[in-house]
Amino acid sequence: MATPAIPSIDLSDYFERGNKADVAHAMARACEDIGFLTIVNHGVPAELIRELSTRTFEFFDQPPADKISIAAKAGFGYIRVGGEQLGATLDLASVDYKESLNLKRPIDEASWPTNPAMRHACTRYLDEMVALAGRLMRVFASALNLPEDWFADKTDHASAALRLLNYPPAREIAPGATWAAEHTDYGILTILWSPESAGLQAKARSGEWVDVHASPDAFIINIGDLLMNWTNDRWVSTLHRVVPTVRDIGRRRQSIPFFYNPNPEALIECLPGCSDAAHPPRYAPILAREHLQMKIDKALK
């Protein structure tokens, strides 16, 4: 089996040029084959991305005491280096070498930074991500041969989270080292931006690790566990990890993922057209909030 490349999809082909059938087909192939893709012409202002990147570096450059003052509760707020174990969600022994600031709305004063400029950048970015995720859900529905608005009433009160990640500079590259251990994401989809994607790898169905490359004007998209459940394993929630590379010795790494989950009370059960006599539903129905909390509880110390 050939190892699939990470495909790139131009969203303007779907929303502006009306080439919906070809884009939906490309989306279906990407989600079935590897569960990862990149998107361009996504509509998110470049100046906002740069602003949030700058504010993210400023936040992590603060003294430890200032960051710890908004220490995470129930997964939101600041998490120190080593405070999260993504591999634990798959019962793997690992410690992630990164620190993060995890945010959701409405704003919780205990877990949000107080800097007004950063708050403004984060809220603007969250607005853009929610809108972009909504557009992607329309493409997903088309790719699954469903009405374009099929997911609308399952995501009109979507649970969304923004993570700002700082990977400290590597001093050396030890064999088998990871910055973020292999894991799958929990919800419907992840929208990731990084100024440099080197080190991010996705595991193909063949078992081979595939490097994920994206330019700074693109977003990396991967589907999550709940969408894999929803599609009865037709689409794959792909194992992925972040590994240090030689260029990371003495240099930090930044990434900004946005996680999009269904309405907390949405019942996740096999989608129409994703089961038949030969492929009966593989998962028991579950509320979205129950699935998400189960994963968070496993990942956090």
Image (cartoon, rainbow, N blue to C red):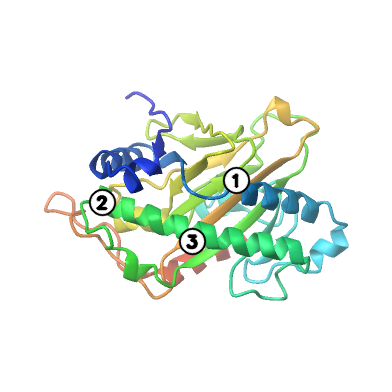
Query: In this view of the protein, which residue sits in the foreground, 173 or 211?
Result: 211
Q: Amino acid at mark 3?
A: Val
Mark 2 or mark 3: name the one nearer the start of the chain. Answer: 3
- Residue 9 visible in image: yes
Q: Residues within 10 Å of mark 3 (few under 14, many from 20)?
A: many
CA distance for labels 1 and 2:
28 Å
Pointer 1 and pointer 3: residues touching (CB < 8 Å)?
Answer: no
Tell me the residue that label 3 is attached to: 130
Where is residue 79, by image quadrant?
A: bottom right
Q: Amino acid at mark 1?
A: Ala
Q: Is residue 287 above or below residue 40?
A: below
Query: In this view of the protein, which residue sits in the foreground, 230 or 161?
Result: 161
Work out which quarter of the rendered image holds the N terminus and state it: top left
Q: In the displayed structure, does residue 21 sit left or right of residue 244? A: left
CA distance for labels 1 and 3:
16 Å
Q: Residue at position x 39%, y 52% from top?
A: 136
Which tag is nearer the camera, tag 1 or tag 3?
1
Work out which quarter of the rendered image holds the C terminus and state it: bottom right
- Residue 301 visible in image: no
Residue 288: image x %, image y %? 41, 68
Disc number placed over residue 142 in the picture, else none:
2
Q: Is residue 186 above or below residue 24?
A: below
Q: Residue at position x 35%, y 53% from top?
A: 228
Which tag is nearer the camera, tag 1 or tag 2?
1
Q: Amino acid at mark 2?
A: Ser
Tell me the residue that label 1 is attached to: 46
